[in-house]
Image: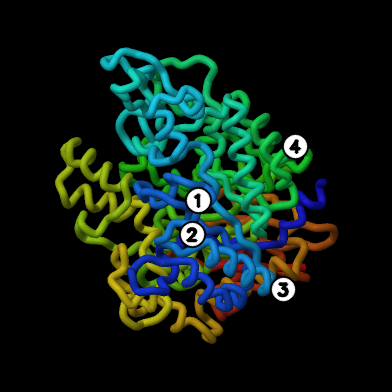
Amino acid sequence: MESKMTEFRDKVVYQIYPKSFQDSDGDGIGDLRGIIRRLDYLKDLGVDYLWLTPVFISPQNDNGYDVADYRRIDPRYGTMADMEELISESRKRGMGIMLDMVFNHTSTSHEWFQRALAGEKEYQDYYIFKEESPEKMPTNWVSKFGGPVWEYVPGLGKWYLHLFDVTQADLNWENPRVREELKDVLRFWKAKGIQGFRFDVVNLISKPEVWEDDFEGDGRRFYSDGPKVHEYLKELVRDADIGDCVTVGEMSSTTLKNCVGYSNPDEQELSMCFHFHHLKVDYKDGNKWELMEPDYRRLKELFREWQEGMQIGNGWSALFLCNHDQPRTVSRFGDEGRYWKQSAMMLAGMIHLMRGTPYVYQGEEIGMTNPHFASIEQYRDVESLNYYQILREQGKSGVEALEVLAARSRDNGRSPMQWNGEKNGGFSDGAPWIPMADNAETIHVQSQMGDSESVLTFYKKLITLRKEMKIISEGTICFLEEADDRVIAYRRNLGEEELLVYGNLSGTVRTVSEMFSSGGYQKILGNYKEEPEMTDGRLTLRPYELVVMYR
C-alpha cells in the first residue's frame, strides 16, 4: 500500500475557493462553470489536484462549511452535471478534483438534525445532546467562533454541542451509524471520479469520555486529537476504500506526534496533514485578535521542529502559508510595497522547496495581497463579524477593531480572484458577493502572463522543479543558520545530490553567519537577476532575496 500512499509526493495542489474564483453567470458568486472556464490556466500553471472548498447544499452561515446535504451541489455553484463535467474536463488535462469533507459537524438545517429536533431518538444519537437544566451548560467550553459551545433546545430539554457556529452541530462519531453514513458519502463521490479528499478539522471528531469544565483554556485540550481519532480514520479510509485517493486532514491545535500517526503510510490513515502552529507566530499571547509583529525566531524553530520531526517519524506535511482562513502571505510575512514581488517569490520558494506537498491558494501565484477593507460593511465572515462586536465590547474603538480585522480576518483570503484589469477584475459581470481588493487593477493574471520575471512565472518554475528534481519531492531536510532570526536556510539531500535554500525574511541586507564554499554549486533559482553576493566567504542576501543552489 505504501506506493499508493506516497506516489503523490511530487505533486502540487491548487486550492480553489469557488465563491471567489470565477463567476460564469453574472450573479457575483463564483461557480463550477467558472472553474471549468479556467482549467487551461490551471493546467498551464502545472498543478495536479484542484481542492474545492465545500460546494454542497448549505445555508452558508460559514461559507459552506455548514453542510446541509453531502450529496447535492448548492444551486449557487451549479448542478451535479456541472460537477461531473468539471471532474471529466479536469481529468482530460491531467488534474484530479479534491473535495472538502466537513465530517466533524453538519448544518442544523441538515435532515438528520431536523429529525433530531422533531424528537426522533435515532437521529438525536447522530449528534451530541446532553441533558442538563436550562441554567446549567454541560461544560464551560468556548466556541471557535466565540461564545459557548452549547445551545439549549427547549422542546427537547437538552443541550447540543457546536464547537463552531451555533448552526454547526457536532456529529457523534461514537455512533456506528454516523460513521457508516459518512463512508457512504465518500463512496458516492469516489464513484463520480473524485480523486482526493480534504477532511475539515478532522482531529476533533473523537470527543472525550468524560465531560468536564476547562479552567485553564477554552476546552480544546479535551477534544483535540481525541482518544479514538486514529481508530476512526483507519476505519473510514479502509471501509470507504479511499486508500488510493490523496487525502489531507486539517488538524486543529494538534501535536507533532499525532500528525506523524495521521500521515505515516504504515498507519494507513491519511496522505498528509495541515497544521497551523507556524501561522500563530504573530498572535500576541496566543490570541489571534491581538496584533504583534511576527516572531521570526519562533517561525524558524517551528519549521525546523515540524519538518525534521515529521521526517524522523516518516510523516508527511501539507506545505502552505495561506488559505481561505488565513491572511494573504505577502501581506503577513512579506512587503506589500517596495519589495512586493521579491517577498512574494521568496516566501513561495521557502515553502515549496521544503519536505512535503505544496498547496497554492488561488491568487497566491500572482502575489495577491489583503484587500484592505475600510469598513465593517465590507466584511462577510461570521467569525470576523462576531469578533468585531467582541472587540468593541472589550473597549476597542471602531477604528482599532477594524485594524485588527484588516490583519486577521478570514475575508482577507476571500476577496475575488484578480484575472485582469477590467471591471471587477474579470471575476464577474455583476457586483461581487464581497468587494474586490483595492489593487485589483494592477495585480492580476493578465499582467503577469508571458512576463518572464513575474510572480506567476516564478510559481511555474517552482512547480516544474518539483516534478523534474526528485531531491525536492524525496530528499531529506536539515535546517541551517541559527544566528539570524530573519534568515531561513536549509539543505536537502538525496544520495550524492544536494540542494541549498537561503531566504531573507526582511527588507534589509543580511549576511549568513555560516561559511559557504560555492565550489561545485550552481544557482538554479532566485528572485534577483544578479548572482549571489559573497562577503568574506559568507553569503550576503539582498532584501527578501531567495537563493537556491544545487550540486
Distance from the alpha carbon under mark 2 to that under mark 1:
8 Å
Please give the label number shown on residue 522: 3
Q: Nearer the viewer, mark 4 or mark 2?
A: 4
Q: CA distance from mark 4 to mark 2?
A: 36 Å
Please report contact status of discs 2 and 1: CB closer than 8 Å, yes or no.
yes
Which residue is label 4 attached to? Answer: 267
- Secondary structure type for disc 4: helix
The quadrant of the picture occupied by the C terminus is: bottom right
Q: Name the residue tied to disc 2.
A: 505
Q: Earlier in the sequence, mark 4 or mark 2?
A: 4
Res. 540 image quadrant: bottom right
Instruction: Indicate the amino acid at tag 3.
Output: Gln
Precedes in sequence: disc 4 or disc 3:
4
Write the residue at 51% across / 25% down. Answer: 122
Q: Which residue is mark 1?
A: 485
Residue located at (30% from left, 31% from top):
147
Tell me the kind of residue under disc 2.
Answer: Leu
Judge whether 437 appears above or below 531 on screen: above
**Residue at mark 3 to residue at mark 2: CA–CA distance:** 22 Å
| Residue type marked 1 | Asp
